[in-house]
Image (spheres, rainbow, N blue to C red):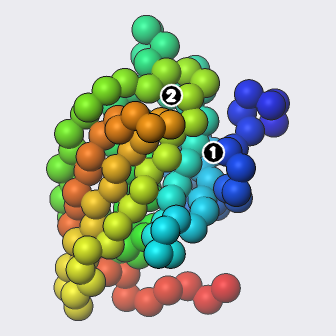
Amino acid sequence: MSEDDAPAAGFEKLASRSPFVQESGTFYKREGPGGALVVGTRIGPAQANAEARVHGAFLLTLADFALSVAAYGITLNLSADFLRPAHVGDWVEAHVTVRKRGESVIFADAILRSGTDELMRVSGLFSPFAKRPEP
C-alpha cells in the first residue's frame, strides 16, 4: 500500500466475504460518536469516471456496504441524494446511523463525506439476517 492509498488515522481494514465488495475497493472502519459505524475508503482510478471524479455507482456501493454492515441485514431499498463529487485521491467516509431495528425491517441512513464536504445522503431499509456468524 502506498502512502497515497493509506487510510485516515484511526481506521482499520474492514473485511468482507462478498466478492463484489472485495473487487470494488478497500474499505476501512472505525467507531464514530456514540459507537456509530464509520466506513472509509481512498478513491482510486478504478472508482472514478473519465473526469477523475468518483463514479456515482461506487458511492452507492460504499453506502450500501456501510449501511448493511451496521444494520446487519440485506438491502430492501436505498434512496440517495448526490450533493457534490469526490475526486481521485480523496478519502471518503460513510457515517452511518441505525434509526430503528425491528424484527422484520431495519431503518438506517448515512452521510458520505470527504473532509467537511457532504457528498451524498442515503437512507435505506434492510431485512435482518437470521443470526450473526460465529467469530
In front here: 28 or 65?
Answer: 28
Q: CA distance from mark 1 to mark 2?
A: 11 Å
The reply, left or right, for residue 73 in relation to residue 41 is left
At 26% from the left edge and 46% from the top edge, which residue is drawn? 121
Residue 9 tag number: none
Examine the rendering and report whether any part of residue 20 can be seen: no
The C terminus appears in which quarter of the rendering?
A: bottom right
Residue 26 tag number: 1
Q: Which residue is mark 2?
A: 47
In front here: 118 or 1?
Answer: 118
- Residue 94 x/y as whole percent: 44, 51
The reply, left or right, for residue 133 in relation to residue 64 is right
Q: Is residue 14 above or below residue 51?
A: below
Q: Is residue 52 above or below residue 115?
A: above
- Residue 99 x/y as whole percent: 26, 74
Amino acid bearing label 2: Gln
- How would you rate the neighbour count of disc 2 (Cα within 10 Å): few for under 14, some for 14-19, many for 20 or more? some
At 42% from the left edge and 56% from the top edge, which residue is drawn? 95
Q: Residue furthest toward the right?
A: 2
The N terminus appears in which quarter of the rendering?
A: top right
- Residue 25 x/y as whole percent: 58, 40
At 20% from the left edge and 39% from the top edge, which residue is drawn? 81
Q: Quadrant of residue 128?
A: bottom left
Q: Is residue 132 above or below residue 51?
A: below
- How would you rate the neighbour count of disc 1 (Cα within 10 Å): few for under 14, some for 14-19, many for 20 or more? some
The reply, left or right, for residue 11 in relation to residue 76 is right
Q: Quadrant of residue 109?
A: bottom left
Could you tell which of marks 1 and 2 lies nearer the N-terminus? 1
Q: Give the total number of marks visible in the rendering.
A: 2
Task: Say what secondary structure mark 1 lies in.
Answer: loop
Amino acid bearing label 1: Thr
